[in-house]
Amino acid sequence: MNDIILSIIIPAYNEEKRIGFTLEEFGKFFEGRKKEKELKDFEIVVVLNACKDNTINIVKEYKKKFKKIRFIEFERGGKGFAITEGFKDALSRKNNLIGFVDADMATSPKDFYDLVKNINGYDGIIASRAVKGSKAEFTLKRKITHRGFNFVVRSLLFLPYHDTQCGAKIFHRDVLKGIVNEIGTTKWAYDIDLLYKIKKKGFKIKEHPTVWKDKEGSKINVIKTTIQMFLAVLRLRILNSPFRGIIKLYGKLPENFRIERF
């Protein structure tokens, strides 16, 4: 374990109310792991995407407190775009594990580190709220839509995972190095596109039980988002099928649902 250099990417869009607590907790926790020589080194990369609030100034303040915090800022928005740019930034430095986690502390630093400890011989590890041993606080509506969406993902793309959407994942740098320029930036199917491409390359990803708490302040409408995610997965299936070049329907779809490249 003590040879690990970990890059933690945190995408942030208008997170002024939550980012400070997240950076405080992650900063303290991983400084502790380094002090105890459980890690060789780490960094926290905050990717600000099209923020309109005071997020950047809060991040700057915490950067003074925790030297391992760095940030990059973009006028363009979108969580998928932010994570991919975080991957690219992290790949420009020395590390052997690169992961990302949501800014809302739904996954605690302790539970994120649990992924690090359990990656073992796998190429990557993803937190799961739907396998034995997990502890997830879901509303009934979110639980129903989550299970329905996962059924769609498994049926259309044959991904073997029970939970593709939990916002905590870690990969060996070689995995990301091989696909970072191929990942789509669609808003609602980013994690699925990422995992699908990794699977096609033959890498082995472990699904690991996690503790997850639904946090206040979410900007997501569960029902509307589920519908959008379903459409995004359907389009991803089309893009990865023999019909990609002949189905005219795809070109007429709203831009928000297309798999864009950059």
Image: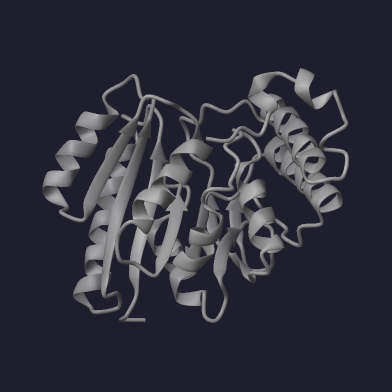
Instruction: Relative to 114, say whether 226 is above or below.
Output: above
Quarter holding residue 49: top left
What colouring style does the render use?
one colour
Horizontal relation, residue 140 to residue 79: left or right: right
Taking the spot 87% from the left edge, 44% from the top edge, the residue there is 242
Horizontal relation, residue 160 to residue 259: left or right: right
Instruction: Relative to 5, say whether 46 is above or below.
Output: above
Taking the spot 64% from the left edge, 71% from the top edge, the residue there is 204
Taking the spot 56% from the left edge, 66% from the top edge, the residue there is 125
Looking at the image, which is closer to me, 227 or 41? 41
Number of dots carrying numbers:
0
Looking at the image, which is closer to me, 51 or 112? 51
Residue 251, position as x, y percentages in the image: 77, 22
Residue 157, position as x, y percentages in the image: 80, 51
Taking the spot 37% from the left edge, 24% from the top edge, the residue there is 75
Quadrant assignment for the N terminus? bottom left
Residue 170, position as x, y percentages in the image: 49, 62
Quarter holding residue 16: top left
Instruction: Relative to 2, say whether 33 is above or below.
Output: above
Residue extending furthest toward the front: 245
Horizontal relation, residue 113 to residue 231: left or right: left
Residue extending furthest toward the left: 64
Looking at the image, which is closer to me, 162 or 200? 200
Looking at the image, which is closer to me, 191 or 221? 191
Residue 15, position as x, y percentages in the image: 36, 31
Quarter holding residue 126: bottom right
